[in-house]
Image (cartoon, helix red, strand yellow):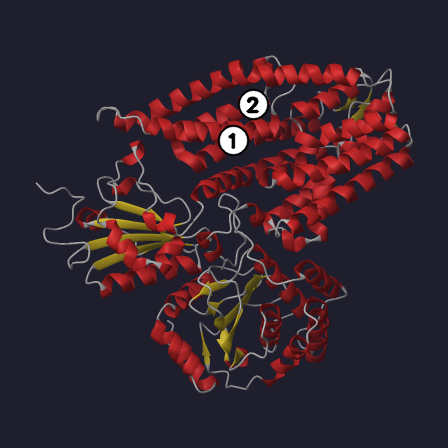
């Protein structure tokens, strides 16, 4: 009897007759989802096989595979950089690779799928194919990074909601007492504070649980969350302080990999259905919980006790030295055992030596304030979610909630934690030298506002200087590391390929490795931001548009060709308004036969000026800045001589698309090494309704995969001819 996993008789690896299925998906679900689908379908057709491809894009799953499709399939290729449900493919040969392999190696994947492992459900997951390994996709670190980002993404709402509710309740309902800022039990604000505390308490379990979930799927969620809760509650293992977010990261990874190991255990078939919902969660949760309480808990408690004794021996030494040490400890783990040791040490001496608590109080707000300030100073280094979290962190920092910086520290610990510690040490040292006193066991500017601090001017000096140090060091370390969040991930081919997001990456899926956008990016973007800050530019004022764009261009490049690129935009041919394609987003006004620019940065400026000719750009400089910021997250050079720079910004009043050609090609950092000769620029407002622009981009990406289409686009004689070729996209 022929197994459903086997191909039809006589169907060889390269022979005709295979019925294949594929699923393509990328973290943002836009261009590469559809590019991979098109390439796989074309390759299957050329090899004589039939293939149906399901795309899981931003506008939902399309061309969905039916049960009948799966039952008749000889093999399934999953080309995806995010989780794809494989339960429907049990008993079939499944090859799992990155989306970049689907684009660049479709023929090879079709050859390999015939010998791919048979998927057995939760008990066994197919490993990535040799194609993925050969491409150097950095699987080990990629999984680790994606899991960490997944946990951070789900943790952020808990931090923001819980922290802000606590801060508001303290501000509006708190009273300053010798025990700190206390809210009366019968107060309405006590209820608000309790709700916020619940949200805050769930922060650590959410981080741990969704790290585990990203590694081993749903069976790992419960052990991850329970492990995170245990890590956060030191009383379970005789410690006055929990293990904090660092402990949650540990339990998350332990739970994830423990569940993966349990899944590999061979069990009788009658047990398999209950493995993912009963056996695995119970075994993993029990094992992880007991391990943390009885094995890891003891060292954590020991560290807490020894640190407390050590600090007690320093009370007679230099105030500056003690302030530095307390500042370093406060900023290290933001709620973990080291932080709690310093805080409880200071709180215990409030009545005898309030200067110790004064140093702690100055250091407590520095991590969230510093990280929040960094998101304001260099917005391009952070995605939209991080910028919003930065605003919340500023608010939490004012109220002395150090945990507001945890999302930043969890996302890039090697850069953020040292910056936090340096700023905390500076704040603690200044407060110690100035003999700042804090008469309540609480920190942050709120205690000074409520009159609990002695030496208020120097207290604020300490906080401001420490905050500035943390922000500047964070920016410097991120710049040295190559840019934003993605710099902490491997710059592998699959990561570099997925770079065409109009919407910033969700942290449940990681932000891409920055491929770089030329020298001087940091200074340039700052210059652009400074230019845009001088005032909004009216869309109808062409002269003002030109002036702003040219002034923004000069600091970033400085070359003559770049300076002349913007004025050239005025030469765009006038085409009748009826000549428009891509649902009217691209017209003759936004088509240019030849780019003047010879570099990526100058090309983006030139394309922005081209879009400005439509009157839909309210601030050209801000559009340029937003496009540069997107490039810093990852190249928008897609390969196949295509680049699609883009921005989602309120600098435009309506969606608009531009197209230009560069016969010589522009170096864009594409994963296949080709220079960009076909450049599309897409800009949509932040509040753009619906997914129409995503649909258009999907259609555009698919069409551009055809070599014949690209050749005709390159060879079109004039703007009208270009529009006729692009008009085929529907």
Which of the two residues, 382 or 172, is positioned nearer the viewer here? Answer: 382
Residue 374 bears which disc, if any? Answer: none
Quarter placement of the N terminus: top left
Quarter placement of the C terminus: bottom left
Spot occupied by residue 291 in the image (x, y as percentages of width and height): 48, 17
Which residue is tagged 1? 208
Is 632 left, or right, of 90 in this rendering?
Answer: right
* Residue located 45% across and 50% down the image: 27
Is 36 left, or right, of 177 in this rendering?
Answer: left
Which of the two residues, 679 or 183, is positioned nearer the viewer here? Answer: 679
* Residue located 48% across and 63% down the image: 670
Which of the two residues, 675 or 682, is positioned nearer the viewer here? Answer: 675
Spot occupied by residue 58 in the image (x, y as percentages of width and height): 44, 54
* SS class, disc 1: helix
Above-or-below relation of 484 to 530:
above
Which of the two residues, 371 or 520, is positioned nearer the viewer here? Answer: 520
Above-or-below relation of 138 to 262:
below
Spot occupied by residue 477 in the image (x, y as percentages of width and height): 67, 46
**Is residue 472 something that shows in the picture?**
yes
Which residue is tagged 2? 231
Is 426 left, or right, of 396 in this rendering?
Answer: right
* Residue located 75% across and 17% down the image: 310
Spot occupied by residue 78 in the image (x, y as percentages of width and height): 32, 49
Q: Quadrant of residue 360?
A: top right
């Amino acid at each position: 009897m022929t197994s459903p996993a086997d191909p039809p008789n006589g169907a060889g690896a390269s022979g005709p007759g295979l019925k294949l299925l594929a699923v393509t998906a990328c973290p943002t679900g836009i261009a590469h989802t559809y590019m991979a689908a098109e390439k796989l379908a074309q390759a299957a057709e050329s090899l004589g096989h039939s293939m149906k491809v399901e795309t899981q894009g931003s506008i939902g799953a399309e061309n969905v595979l039916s049960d009948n499709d799966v039952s008749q399939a000889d093999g399934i290729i999953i080309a995806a950089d995010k989780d794809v449900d494989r339960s429907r493919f049990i008993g079939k040969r499944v090859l799992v690779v990155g989306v970049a392999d689907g684009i660049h190696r479709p023929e090879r994947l079709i050859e390999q799928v015939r010998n791919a492992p048979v998927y057995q459900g939760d008990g066994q997951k197919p490993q990535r194919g040799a194609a993925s390994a050969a491409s150097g996709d950095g699987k080990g670190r990629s999984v680790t990074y994606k899991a960490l980002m997944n946990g951070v993404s789900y943790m952020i709402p808990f931090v923001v909601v819980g922290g802000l509710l606590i801060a508001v309740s303290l501000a509006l309902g708190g009273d300053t007492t010798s025990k700190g800022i206390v809210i009366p039990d019968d107060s309405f604000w006590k209820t608000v504070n309790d709700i916020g505390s619940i949200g805050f308490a769930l922060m650590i379990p959410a981080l741990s649980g969704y790290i585990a979930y990203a590694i081993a799927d749903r069976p790992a969620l419960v052990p991850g969350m329970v492990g995170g809760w245990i890590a956060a509650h030191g009383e379970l293992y005789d410690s006055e302080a929990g293990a904090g977010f660092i402990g949650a990261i540990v339990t998350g990874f332990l739970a994830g990999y423990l569940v993966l190991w349990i899944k590999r255990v061979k069990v009788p078939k009658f047990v398999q259905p209950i493995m993912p919902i009963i056996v695995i969660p119970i075994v993993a949760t029990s094992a992880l919980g007991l391990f943390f309480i009885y094995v890891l808990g003891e060292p954590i408690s020991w560290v807490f006790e020894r640190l407390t004794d050590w600090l007690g021996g320093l009370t007679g030494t230099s105030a500056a030295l003690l302030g530095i040490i307390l500042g370093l400890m406060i900023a290290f783990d933001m709620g973990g055992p080291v932080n709690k040791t310093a805080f409880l040490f200071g709180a215990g001496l409030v009545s005898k030596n309030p200067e110790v608590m004064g140093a702690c109080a100055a250091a407590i707000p520095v991590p969230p304030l510093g990280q929040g300030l960094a998101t304001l100073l260099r917005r391009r280094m952070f995605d939209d979610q991080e910028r919003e979290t930065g605003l919340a962190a500023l608010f939490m920092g004012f109220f002395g909630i150090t945990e507001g910086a945890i999302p930043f520290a969890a996302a890039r610990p090697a850069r953020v934690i040292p910056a936090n510690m340096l700023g905390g040490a500076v704040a603690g040292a200044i407060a110690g030298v100035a003999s700042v006193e804090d008469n309540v066991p609480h920190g942050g500017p709120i205690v000074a506002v409520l009159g609990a601090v002695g030496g208020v001017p120097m207290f604020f000096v300490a906080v401001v200087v420490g905050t500035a140090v943390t922000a500047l060091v964070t920016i410097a370390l991120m710049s040295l590391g190559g840019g934003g969040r993605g710099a902490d991930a491997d710059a592998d081919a699959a990561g570099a390929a997925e770079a065409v997001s109009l919407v910033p990456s969700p942290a449940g899926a990681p932000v891409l490795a920055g491929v770089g956008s030329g020298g001087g990016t940091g200074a340039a973007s700052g210059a652009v931001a400074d230019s845009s800050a001088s005032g909004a530019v009216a869309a109808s004022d062409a002269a003002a548009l030109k002036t702003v764009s040219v002034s923004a261009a000069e600091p970033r490049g400085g070359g003559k060709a770049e300076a002349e690129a913007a004025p050239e935009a005025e030469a765009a041919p006038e085409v009748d308004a009826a000549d428009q394609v891509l649902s009217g987003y691209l017209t003759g006004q936004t088509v240019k036969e030849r780019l003047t620019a010879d570099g990526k940065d100058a090309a983006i400026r030139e394309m922005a000026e081209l879009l400005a000719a439509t009157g839909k750009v309210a601030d050209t400089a801000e559009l340029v800045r937003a496009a540069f910021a997107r490039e810093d997250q990852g190249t928008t050079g897609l390969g196949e001589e295509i680049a699609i720079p883009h921005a989602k910004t309120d600098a435009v009043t309506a969606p608009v698309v531009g197209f230009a050609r560069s016969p010589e090609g522009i170096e864009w950092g594409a994963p296949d090494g080709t220079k960009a000769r076909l450049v599309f620029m897409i800009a949509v407002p932040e509040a753009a309704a619906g997914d129409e622009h995503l649909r258009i981009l999907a259609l555009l990406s698919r069409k551009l995969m055809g070599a014949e289409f690209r050749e005709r686009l390159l060879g079109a004689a004039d703007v009208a001819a270009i529009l006729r070729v692009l008009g085929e996209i529907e």
